[in-house]
Image (cartoon, rainbow, N blue to C red):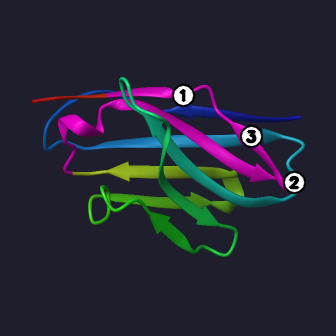
Amino acid sequence: QVQLVESGGGLVQAGGSLRLSCAVSGSARSINRMGWHRQGPGNQRELVATITSGGSTNYADSVKGRFTISKDNAKNTVYLQMNGLKPEDTAVYYCNCLCNWYNYWGQGTQVTVSS
């Protein structure tokens, strides 16, 4: 089994910053790709950013230039640095891992941006 443990959510004012972390534990023999998705109130879950095992990144247009995804292979941890936060970024953020070529999800962490 693979477990994902997220941390770093919270309440921040518009224009502020937060950093989310997601640590992978368990029997992850290979971490193929990791990423962050989010689901805001009344919305469907949407992709925020992904990073492959080789370090290639992909971002949703709405966060380009404000969010940065990175990883620490030694710690099996992925990060999401969020700068210039906007009220519309308010959502539950979910970590995702394509580990052993199977999709795993974290429990989610709430990010709330006040105007």
The disc at residue 108 is: 1
Q: CA distance from mark 3 to mark 1?
A: 12 Å
Please say whether residue 102 is visible from this viewpoint: yes
Q: CA distance from mark 3 to mark 2?
A: 10 Å
Bounds of the magenta span?
Answer: 84-111
Q: Give coordinates of residue 95: x percent, y percent.
A: 58, 41
Q: Quadrant of the C terminus?
A: top left
Q: Give coordinates of residue 12: x percent, y percent.
A: 22, 30
Mark 2 crowd level (few <14, some 14–19, many ≥20, 10 Å Cα): some
Q: Secondary structure at mark 3?
A: strand
Res. 60 image quadrant: bottom left
Q: Secondary structure at mark 1?
A: loop
Residue placed under numbered mark 3 in the picture: 104
> Height in image: 97 above or below 64?
above
Residue plotted at (54% across, 36% down): 94
The disc at residue 100 is: 2
Q: Are marks 3 and 2 in contact (CB under 8 Å)?
A: no
Q: Amino acid at mark 2?
A: Asn
Q: Secondary structure at mark 2?
A: loop
Mark 3 crowd level (few <14, some 14–19, many ≥20, 10 Å Cα): some
Please tell me which residue lies in front, 21 or 109. Answer: 109
